Image (spheres, helix red, strand yellow):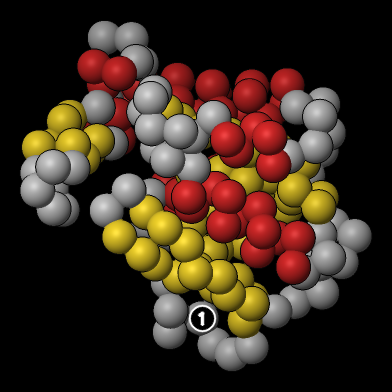
């Protein structure tokens, strides 16, 4: 099997009725798909033409490829976590999901002037990515781009590109 939309298992009505959850489990269980996924993310990151100082990815599924991407790019990794998962002090942002509201926090560290790559496994409405872009900017760092393993076309995620340079 080649990596594509059929590589993800569709789980209807989860976590709420009307949501079509895209399960990444089949990609993670197949070493060829897993390798291809990592290679595609790295290629997309390199196509941006700028080396990041850090990769920022949200829990939980952004943590699956984010650290490996960081290692391949010789960049640090910054986890964006849900409330009360990081010690104080943090910077935080509230944002909208396809199925509700959430908050993300990143460590309140000295990031001013750093270049940051945003990564998540899935681009749906763009709410998480847009929140991460704003959160990164609030630290004085500059997001240089965003890479995703998959996109749910038709949900508005394309707005992310308008928020990034280039």
Residue 158 image offset from top left, x and y in percent:
54, 30
Image quadrant occupied by the N terminus: top left
User: Left of 53 or right of it: where is 66?
Assistant: left
The answer to whether residue 138 is above or below residue 108 is above
User: Left of 74 or right of it: where is 35?
Assistant: left
Which residue is the site of mark 1?
Answer: 86
User: Left of 61 or right of it: where is 57?
Assistant: right
Image quadrant occupied by the C terminus: top right
Q: Residue at x 62, y 81 (%)?
A: 90
Q: Residue at x 57, y 57 (%)?
A: 131
82 or 138: nearer the viewer: 138
- Identity of the residue furthest to the bottom in this view: 88
Residue 2 image offset from top left, x and y in percent:
33, 9
The answer to whether residue 133 is above or below residue 79 is above
- Dot 1 crowding, Cα within 10 Å, few <14, some 14–19, many 20+: some
- Residue 21, quarter of the rendered image: top left
The answer to whether residue 92 is above or below residue 72 is below
- Residue 107, quarter of the rendered image: bottom right
109 or 98: nearer the viewer: 98
Q: Residue at x 42, y 58 (%)?
A: 96
The answer to whether residue 114 is above or below residue 158 is below
């Amino acid at each position: 099997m080649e990596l594509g939309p059929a590589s993800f298992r569709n789980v209807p009505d989860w976590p709420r009725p009307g949501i079509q959850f895209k399960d990444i489990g089949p990609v993670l269980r197949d070493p060829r798909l897993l390798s291809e996924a990592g290679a595609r993310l790295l290629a997309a990151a390199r196509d941006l033409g700028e080396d990041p100082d850090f990769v920022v990815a949200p829990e939980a599924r952004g943590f699956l490829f984010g650290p490996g991407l960081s290692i391949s790019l010789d960049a640090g990794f910054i986890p964006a976590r849900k409330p009360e998962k990081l010690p104080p002090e943090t910077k935080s942002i509230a944002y909208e999901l396809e199925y509700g509201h959430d908050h993300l926090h990143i460590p309140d560290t000295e990031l001013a002037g750093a270049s940051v790559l945003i990564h998540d496994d899935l681009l749906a409405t763009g709410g998480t990515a847009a929140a991460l872009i704003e959160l990164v900017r609030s630290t004085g760092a500059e997001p240089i781009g965003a890479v995703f393993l998959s996109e749910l076309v038709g949900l508005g995620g394309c707005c992310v590109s308008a928020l990034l340079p280039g």
